[in-house]
Amino acid sequence: MSRSALGAAALLIAAALGLAGCGDGGGGSGGESAARDTSTIKAADSSLGRILVDGSGRTLYLFTGDSQNTNAMDCDAACLRLWPPMEGRPKAGAGVDASRIGSTAAKGDKTQATYAGHPLYYYADDKSAGDVNGQGIDKIWYVLDAAGSAITKSPKPADNGGYGY
């Protein structure tokens, strides 16, 4: 095999591996471990205190750049896979005030759930109910309490058995 043919083959393999790694942005709609239940917003205990979650326990976030009842996030397709909106108009579950639940126009033809005027989002790298991996990212993404206020503290570190990693 000639040197140029080997180089071309290596390039094709690298390109194929690169495309395979693109997937859905590290968790988005195709590879989630926990299903979303957008029918309900409720309060649940977490490492950050009592926070808002959906009907299946998935953590809900606010984006500090959004305006009252307005999704202002300028987000491309990759961003939307990482921070998908909670769609629809859910009902109130345990620990939340039904009068704080609403909806607003989302990108496209869908509606996005709001709580106390904050459009709600999921974080794709939250793989299980109760995960709060999106907390504090870029100091603009936060979980909410039942009053509809952002909780800005950091999550408690996981118990690693004293190994320091």
Image (cartoon, rainbow, N blue to C red):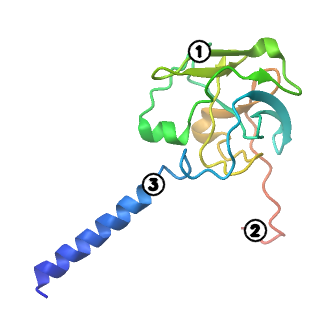
Q: Secondary structure at mark 1?
A: strand
Query: Crowding at label 3, few (<14), some or many (≥20) Cα neighbours within 10 Å?
Result: few
The mark that comes first in sequence, 3 or 2, is 3
The amino acid type of the residue labelled 3 equals Gly
Q: Residue 161 location, x and y as percent?
A: 84, 69
113 to 155, vertically: above or below: above
Q: Residue at x 78, y 40 (%)?
A: 57
Circle 2: is it few (<14), some (14-19), or many (20+) Cα within 10 Å?
Answer: few
x and y, in percent, of residue 32 in the image: 61, 50
Which circle marks residue 49 in the picture? Answer: none
**Amino acid identity at mark 2:** Gly
Q: Nearer the viewer, mark 2 or mark 1?
A: 1
Location of residue 143 by image quarter: top right
Sequence-first disc among 1 and 3: 3
Alpha carbon of mark 3 to alpha carbon of mark 2: how far?
32 Å
Residue at x 76% of width, y 28% of height? 40
Label 1: few (<14), some (14–19) or many (≥20) C-alpha neighbours in 10 Å:
many
Which quadrant holds residue 69?
A: top right
Is there CB contact under 8 Å for labels 1 and 3?
no
Residue shown at 56% from the left, 23% from the top? 65
**Residue 134 location in percent, x, y?**
64, 43
Q: Earlier in the sequence, mark 2 or mark 1?
A: 1
The residue at which mark 2 appears reads as 164
Determine the CA span between mark 1 and mark 3.
29 Å
Residue position marked by numbered label 3 in the rendering: 23
Q: Residue furthest bottom?
A: 1
Residue that mark 1 sits on? 104
